[in-house]
Amino acid sequence: MSHGVSKTVDTSTIPVIDLFAGPGGLGEGFSALCDDRHRQVFRVKLSIEKEAHAHETLLLRAFFRQFLSSQVPEDYYRLLRGELPRETLFNNHKQAAANAAVEAWHAELGVTPDHEIKKRIDTALASAERWVLVGGPPCQAYSLAGRSRNRGNKEYLPEKDERHYLYRQYLRVLAQHRPPVFVMENVKGLLSATVSNQGLFGRMVEDLQAPRKALGLSEENPPLRYELHSVVPEAVGGKTEQLKNYLVESERHGVPQARHRLILLGVRSDLAKTPGRLPVSDTVSVSQWLSDLPPIRSGLSDRPDSANAWLEHIKSAQDRRWYGSATSGNQRLRTKLDEIVGAIAQPLHDRGARYIPWKRSSMAPEWVRDVALAGVCNHESRTHMAKDLHRYLFASAFAGVESRSPLLSDFPTDLLPDHANVTRGVEDKFFADRFRVQLAGHPASTITSHIAKDGHYFIHHDPAQCRSLTVREAARLQTFPDNYYFCGARTSGYVQVGNAVPPLLAHHIARIVAGLLR
């Protein structure tokens, strides 16, 4: 079963309410926490998400979690294998499906009436006094890339961008429901984001300490106040004036990805408790989390695609001018490329599929493993232009030899893309790393929703596959269990995974929260 632990449900489980849930990374991490008697510590009672495909993913996962680890029905795995439609699965297990529909709610904070949200949360909590609120407002407007795009829009006014203030919906839930503990996650770009020359993150921190005051509501007696804490091991007291204390570097905590995110842990003042900190672990690499997955090939987007056409195009690299110029004076790279092109063959599983039978899945890291799955989900490649396949071949071979991803200045001239700003990339390093290989021996770079647009930043380290990462590989690097199925088209899967919180990181945070509440 997932996470390698057989869970039992205890009626004393602590409820979790998940706002802006995405595909459910935070909720998954909390749900997976068990005590020393294998009893589940937390249970997601309500997750709210506006995006349709992400909600479908949440709904299916909520169904999965209705069962004890040893009692997940075979019908669930049949669905993952494409043998059973969802309607049949839910008809065969009506009560579990009904419970899942109550847990995973397709709604939008800020649009769905506040009284409906309040009612759903009250019902989910059922008067529980110990519970936790988790979530992170959508972060596109806060990210450095998002702000760069906004600056290019002359009509963009940050003070009128409602995404800057979606956290006020989070404040409203705090003000109305007074959770003993909350966890809020968001992007690193918040540290430097400003609106009307005011630091946005500093303002949010002040508001979160006194949510009713921030919303202009009358104070209760006693006033609702939260102490904000950092979970970073070296943080000095987690004080609000040291905002960088809240920046968590995921690769230090067992996640195979250099994902840096802001994590705020709020503890209601009357609890008067100080939380623990995240455990530091050895760095884990891309290859440790991806090496057991079946190799597949990329597709061709600008010509008829077939395994033979793909193979012939890769082998044609040796006849191209770039091949000689790339390896001139670099014998190690020449040897590497010759070995790859000489041995390359059509992969057994071609371009992959929504499900691939695969006996080696038991070699996966224990956290993601599920032997009952007997294969791999969401593992299908995208198509690329033929010239990009040669770029990926060069880049991944270069990375294998030089132990770094190549910059544009490292590319042979004939392989440079025909873009207006490429000269800037070569000469002054402007987006010079636009072809980024995920190095086998290192954590991945941050998996973002941009992976849905193109694969240039997410090139697989194996040159023999000449492709970008699949949804499953991205999900692995985000530490989602292999039996976590991402609904919707492949592009939607990339967006869901890129926007998520790594469940393994959430699991570590859940342990800290459990120490506060139990």
Image (spheres, rainbow, N blue to C red):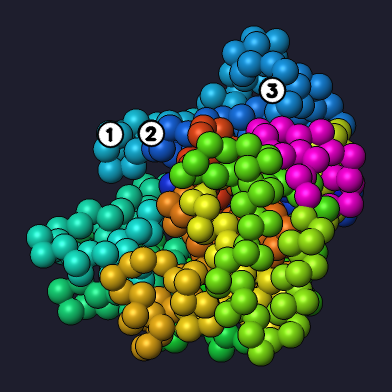
Q: Which residue is mark 2?
A: 107
Q: Amino acid at mark 1?
A: Pro
Residue lying at 56% horizontally and 33% vertically, measured from the top left: 487
* Quadrant in the rendering for residue 287: bottom right
Find numbered disc 2 in the image and state the secondary structure of the residue it sits on. loop
Q: Which mark is residue 113?
A: 1
What is the quadrant of the N terminus in the image?
Answer: top right
Say whether disc 1 or disc 2 marks the residue closer to the N-terminus. Answer: 2
Q: Quadrant of the C terminus?
A: bottom right
Tell me which label, 3 or 2, sits earlier in the chain. 3
Judge left or right: residue 34 versus residue 414.
Answer: right
User: Is the C-beta separation of discs 1 and 2 under 8 Å?
Assistant: no
What residue is drawn where x is 74% and y is 85%? Answer: 331
Rendered location of residue 489, percent (x, y): 51, 34
Asked if the residue under mark 3 is in contact with the one under mark 1, i.e. CB atoms within 8 Å, the reply is: no
The percent coordinates of residue 218 (x first, y second) are 24, 56
Q: Which residues are magenta?
A: 345-364
**Residue 91 at least partly seen:** yes
- CA neighbours of label 2 inside 10 A, class few (<14), some (14 to 19), many (20+): some
Task: Tell me the CA gap for discs 3 and 2.
Answer: 28 Å
Q: What residue would you read off at disc 3?
A: 82
Question: What amino acid type is highlighted by mark number 2?
Answer: Ala
Q: Are marks 3 and 2 in contact (CB under 8 Å)?
A: no
Q: Nearer the viewer, residue 197 or 403?
A: 403
Tag 3: amino acid: Gly
